[in-house]
Image (cartoon, grey):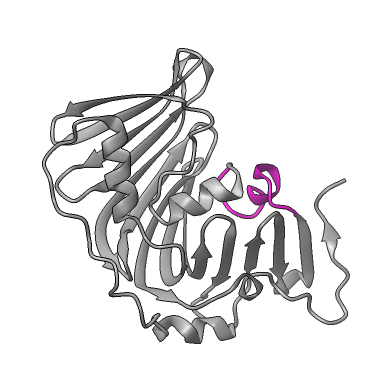
Amino acid sequence: MLLWIAALGLVLSGCAGRRPPALQTRYHSPEAALRALAASAPADQAFTATARIEINHQGERYPLKIAVMMKRPTFLRVESIPLLGPPDFFLSVAKDELRVYLPGKNAFYTGRAVSQNISRFFPIFMPAAEMISLLMGIAPDKREESPALRGEQEERYYRVDGYAANRRTRSLWIDPSGNRLVRIRTFAEGGNVVYEAAFAEHALVGEGFMPQRLTITGDGMAALSLRYTDLQPIAADSESFPLPLPEGIIPILLDP
């Protein structure tokens, strides 16, 4: 088990500084909804958790347990927790670099943290920054793709639609009673859904709210269900994330 797992109980001393935003029942504009959502999101710090994951792909179910450390925009560390024996899978994303270590194969992979490389080891096909935001229950930053916003009340939730070149690029469903993101849906050309992410059981973690359960489904992607336990904010800098190269192993390059 990596040393950073021992930091699960290390909580930043200033985590009580920011108060959750006041509850409301509706928003007067999509911009107001996004501001309220940002105010309730986790602070810019690192978090650790234990996660139980279930992957459903082509009718097969793959359950696993992992320890995870994450920080926006592009920092991630994952370590498997098998029922017996030592961890058999390690993955890290640090800015633009992906590293994966498979002890059973004595193989260490390194390459750019792009969708094609990440999806070879983790069942999500999307850029690292987008994946990490979703794992934290935060809407990825898509302002450059969605310059126009529209909002409307949809039953108990407020939906914010982003548009670019007169086509909808994504929709966010926000619960106004707690300013929490409950669903994201992204769209491709022609209106086809690229993926949908749903978030539930939000809890106050440090200075903001994070979901303890999430699911991600998408066209051509495995369905991923994840449940966190022991979510904690920790003090971790960028150097805490990259996997160290084991002695005597020559890295396998993922990029040509």
Viewer-side residue, 222 vs 45: 45
Q: Is residue 138 left or right of residue 219?
A: left
In the rendered image, the residue lying farthest to the left is 25
Which region shows up in magenta?
112-125
Instruction: Locate the C terminus by quadrant.
Output: top right
Viewer-side residue, 171 vs 166: 166
Q: Position of residue 72 (x, y in %)?
A: 51, 58
Residue 49: quarter of image: bottom left
Q: Does the magenta portion include 97? A: no
- Residue at x-position 11% and y-position 41%: 25
> With respect to residue 41, does 170 lie above or below?
above
Q: Position of residue 8 (x, y in %)?
A: 43, 81
- Residue at x-position 60% and y-position 50%: 128
Viewer-side residue, 108 vs 156: 156
Give the number of marks. Answer: 0
- Residue at x-position 18% and y-position 51%: 178
Q: Position of residue 112 (x, y in %)?
A: 74, 51
Residue 185: quarter of image: top left
> With respect to residue 4, does 68 lie above or below?
above
Instruction: Locate the N terminus by quadrant.
Output: bottom right
Prevailing secondary structure class for the magenta stretch in the rendered image: loop
Q: Does the magenta portion include 122? A: yes
- Residue 10 appears in the picture as rendered: yes
- Residue at x-position 27% and y-position 38%: 33
Viewer-side residue, 60 vs 252: 252
Q: Position of residue 162 (x, y in %)?
A: 40, 26
- Residue 85 appears in the picture as rendered: no
Q: Is residue 152 left or right of residue 54?
A: left
